[in-house]
Image (cartoon, rainbow, N blue to C red):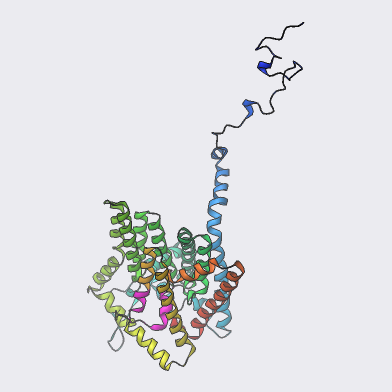
Amino acid sequence: MNPAPPPGIPGSCATGTVAGTGLPEPPPAHPEHLKEDPQKDPQKDSWKDPRKHLSRWLTERILPLLWPPLAVYAATAALHLVLLAAMDGPDGPGLRARLLSWDGLLYADIAANGYPDSYTYTPEGQLTGNNLAFFPLYPLLIRTVHALTGLDHDIAGVVVAHLALIAALVVVQCLFTRLYGRRTATVATVLLAGAQPMAMAFFMSYSESLFLALAAGTLLAAHRRAWLTAGTLALLTGLTRPAAAAAVAALAVAAGLELLRQRRWSARPVAAVALACAGTPLYLWWVGRRVGDLDAWFTIQEAGWGTHWDNGKAFWDFLADTFAHGDGWVPVSTAVLLLALVCATVLAWERGAWPPLLVHGTGIVVLTLCQSNYSHSKLRLLVPALLFLVPAARALARARTRTAVVALAAATAFGCWYGAHMLTVWHYAI
């Protein structure tokens, strides 16, 4: 009788024999030296190839972020411009002239010739407005694009407006995605660039798109707690339009909330607010020093455009007169749309929103409606206010896709037509 093989010798049970045969077991299907290391991250290998890492970063992070606002810009720009060209007619001044209406020509003149150095008077000796009423950042960018590309100042102004609008839509998409999710953010960008009345101003040589990009950038940076970036963007907003006071107030609220959250002193939020407060006063001081009168900017605004703070008296008088005696489509539609925007703003407060966004949007509404400027231009002045878009954007985001698409398409068609109609039929709206 043969003795059993001792333990440890190949063929024994101790080392793994096939039961009843004494033959050694076959090697395992996955030897230990071929098994993947559970601690090893295969994605780290892509760092060895920068091209693979860049490609994955673009496809996974950047493209999903950029394609919705870029698609919205392309679609709304095409629709706005096609409708404007069609409604201009064969005897109209042309698409270029329409896009440069009123303030567009004044911005181009500032970019080409600079600012006047004194008050301006009519031949009868009456004080009137001049280009010192317009803040400097937008014409400075027009001059920069002119110098870099060789485009004339008129077309450079339109290019700056469109580039600023693209940046604004990307920033708004990022901000609303953080606040409400990607679907609501996409709906909001469609409402912003296409559906709201007088969105046409974004595509003209006006500063609305630049103001929106910088103000929304301020809000996004504050939400990310990038305080010095937020302060810098708010300062630039203050060099674009006087309504930047709303963005500064929103940043101050965001900074205050951050200090309450931390329950300790923090220099960066306070520094951001201090930086933001410098923009508009700096330009007003420069105008006063140039003319030799500290109140020069306010005097020019009053003389040229009749603009002063009146606590909303002119707005309420416009509503009362329009609803009592208005007999035309333009004043009635303007009054109805202004009231609709006010109601949407109130609804946003009732349903709750991020406090800095509430302050920014409400500030734009208050600054617009409580001044005595021309009532038909107020729809244009309100287009950078994001707050009144929130209730409709959230409601459509919750609706079925087919319902949302049909509603957005109809609203965008109306918004684009309305802007073209106002610009060609009632050009004082701009």
Q: Could you tell whether 298 is left or right of 401 in the image?
A: left
User: Eyeballing the image, is 114 above or below 84?
Assistant: above
* Residue drawn at point x = 35 percent, y = 71 percent: 363
Residue 5: in magenta span = no
Membership of 373 in magenta stretch: yes
Residue at (52% x, 72% y) in the render? 194
- The answer to which image quadrant residue 126 occupies is bottom left
Q: Which residue is drawn at 38% across and 83% down?
A: 374
State whether residue 160 appears in this view.
yes
Which portion, as a residue range, is magenta?
365-386
Note whether 81 is above or below 324 in the view shown.
Answer: above
- Residue 353 image offset from top left, x and y in percent: 41, 65
Q: Residue at x 37, y 53 (%)?
A: 226
> 126 or 174, which is in the foreground?
174
The residue at the far front in this view is 1
Point out residue 372 in the picture as x, y percentages from the top left corner. Answer: 33, 82
In this orientation, does residue 118 appear?
Answer: no
